[in-house]
Amino acid sequence: MKLEMRIKAVIILLAIILAGWQLSYTWRYTKLTPQKSEELPPSELKKLKDKAIKLGLDLQGGMHLVLQVDMSKLTEKERQGATDRALEILRNRIDQFGVSEPSIAKQGGNRIAIQLPGVVDRARALELIGKTAQLEFRLVEKEKIAEKVLTKIDELVYEKELETEDSLEVFEHPIFALFYNGKVAERDTALFNEYLRMPGVAQIIPSDDELLWDETSSGGLEGVEEYLEPLLVKKKTCLKGDAIVDARAGIGTPKNPVGARVDLTMTPKARRDWAHITGANVGRRIAIVMDGVVKSAPVVIERIAGGRSMIEMGTTPFKEAKDLALIIRAGALPAPVHIVEEHSIGPSLGADSIRAGVRSVYFGAILVLLFMIIYYRMCGVLANFALFFNIFFLLAVLSGLKATLTLPGLAGIVLVLGTAVDANILIFERIREELRTGKTTRSAIDAGYSRAFRTILDANVTTFLSGAILYYFGTGPIKGFAVTLMIGIAANLFTAIVMTKLVLDYVVMKGVKKLYI
Amino acid sequence: MIQIFKNPQYDFIGRRKPAFILSAVVILAGIVSLVAHRGLRYGIDFTGGSLVELRFDNPIKTAEIREKLSHIGLQDAVIQEERGTNRYLIKTMPEEGVGIKIANLFTPPPTVEREELVGPSISEGFRKKAFLVIALGMLVMLIYISVRFTFRWGICAIIAIIHDVLVVVSILSIMNKEFTVLIVAALLAIIGYSINDSIVISDRVRENLRGLRKRVLPEVINTSINQNLSRTILTSLTTFFVLVILFLFGGRVIHDFAFALLIGVIVGTYSSIYILSSLIIEWEKRSPTKSRR
């Protein structure tokens, strides 16, 4: 074999292996049964899900929303960062909403795009999004009382479990068993909340208190599970978000020269109240609550008279301090948001679309494959392999780029099927023509390829260009179509010009006299 | 081996007059239809509005739905039945959460299969963008062809593309299909396909012109089209059949999209044979270029 051919063969093999590797995640993910996915460790499952091809909302069902931040009531200065603040509020709420993999992103200057995949309770989602933000400062209950309450809940839940379930399977201290260093792992919070909903549990909690989750980060490593602390917090609000003028993250605290901190500035009106509250509660914790979640619960060290407070965050990363400052600023000045665009697809319609889309890809493929074999015989088989690898590479690149597969995307694949055949038809028709003029097989292949190459390149470049324009200007679903079209064309050039050619060259080199074309 | 054509020698160029007339008739009919329908039937992407798709468990009459809608002041909503299913599409002015409101009018409430809302600011952006995208698509093609071939080819190819877009829009209007963002995507795909087809033929013409002293353009173009005929027919047919499958089995969401592409493939193939080549010949007849690449 010539060196050039060897290099080509190695490149093709590498491409196939790489694409296969990339697609293996999708394969394994789609083959997962609910039972098997429970056995898998969460990190492994997350990795699989991350690397598998993502389905667009039109295929798996879900909500796509575009919100516009209403800045009409804000002053020029307040407008700056208003979208970021609104985004932070929304992120906070959607995190509580419990959808897997929500996506929230800024779109242009004053719009926010939200995607909630899967089965979504639309009424609740709309209500959550439409609410105005609530930032409150609330006293945390004395630790002794909190401990007593938790102990009582623990005992009650244990009793209830004994009544309802087989006594052999009930362990002592169902509540305390969930704790680790005073905190509860994120995945156990659902179970914890379930215990709290048991009859009689609510009565144990003092009527002026409620249990909230403290989201203050444990400062853990990326990817390691978060731990949350259940805090017993007074229902009464000491101060509201509008008391804050500004919140800024900074570095350097009295105890730690490189520690992260957040500086709060209160309005003149709130200063007296704040001085009073802090003065009366030295040594106790005050929770900063945003939409029912504790964002920070610092201990009051001394009475704060000047309206300037500092939250020392110890060894927490600076980014967390910045996030906290942003949340506090967001709660201080909430700007209302309005829905300007919504696409919600029910799961059954999505499933219908998948079925229809996949079916048409199958049918289209079978039709084209049959046609090529009937018309071009052995070379048709070759073209079919090229076609198969075309779709194979297309899907691999799609999952590698973390692009989503949408319904128009499936239509794009069907269209790519059509155009991929074109490249092969161009080449084969040209080879046939050259053969008719009496050329040998080898020179007919060479001449056919070199002549068809220019045409294929021109034709594909123009289609690629229209795909690129679509991608640049298009929104959601259209982008999906454009992406598959562009990747498909790139894959097409590779399979038709490199792969098919190599095989034909090899066949000729082996001394085949007659080409079945 | 199987061959569709054995050494075809059809006179395409000679029949350019009937082709021009055919195109003109279709486009004229489209314009009449546009006037009669008072413009394109834009979807909510372009007009702004809310679209709710409801699935009822039991059959229900359109009149009953309209009666219920009047309770919440939506008697002017457009109600569309998906025949053969108990699904209904309801279009109203843009309103947040209108789907739930409508569903709750009925007992038992139907399933909200789909809800879309496009606010006026978004739809205005879409309208501007749709035009811009198609215009830009054409401009890019003009530049590309001018560089690869000649400026004259580029202009003729763009006229052929405009022809394609006009014909497809005409037929959509005559059939009173809805004009949505997906249709704009289809139009752009058609532009890509049509240019693709034109380039294949143009490439052949350029190749055949090379080495020819005497300028016999009409004959060369006709020969080139004939030489390429098998390829043109084969490719168009495979693409066409694949699109037929998409049209039949692709699901109702992309039904109209597939339909537009289907027309586009036919028109794109036709225009690269008749319109583009004829335009170039007519132009050359009136003012021959001095030298050709």
Image (cartoon, rainbow, N blue to C red):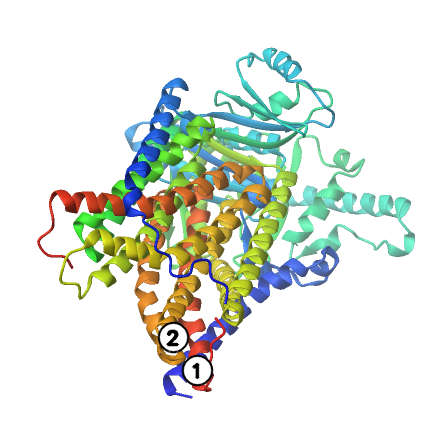
Q: Secondary structure at mark 1?
A: helix
Give how far apart the Cα atoms at labels 2 and 1 are: 9 Å
Label 2 crowd bin: few (<14), some (14–19), many (20+), radius 10 Å: many
The residue depicted at 53 percent of the width and 13 percent of the height is: B76
Quick check: can you spot residue A243?
no
Q: Are marks 2 and 1 on the same chain?
A: yes
The residue depicted at 45 percent of the width and 45 percent of the height is: A324
Residue A445's mark?
2
Give residue A71's quadrant in the image: top left
x, y percentage for residue A15?
47, 72
Q: Which amino acid type is shown beneath numbered disc 1?
A: Val
x, y percentage for residue A40?
68, 63
> Up-down: is A480 above or below B66?
below
State which chain disc 2 sits on: A
Mark 2 or 1, nearer chain start = 2
> Up-down: is A431 above or below A369?
below
Give residue A74's quadrant in the image: top left
Specify whether B25 is left or right of B277: right
Tag 2–tag 1 contact (CB < 8 Å): yes
Q: Which amino acid type is shown beneath numbered disc 2?
A: Ile
Label 1 crowd bin: few (<14), some (14–19), many (20+), radius 10 Å: some
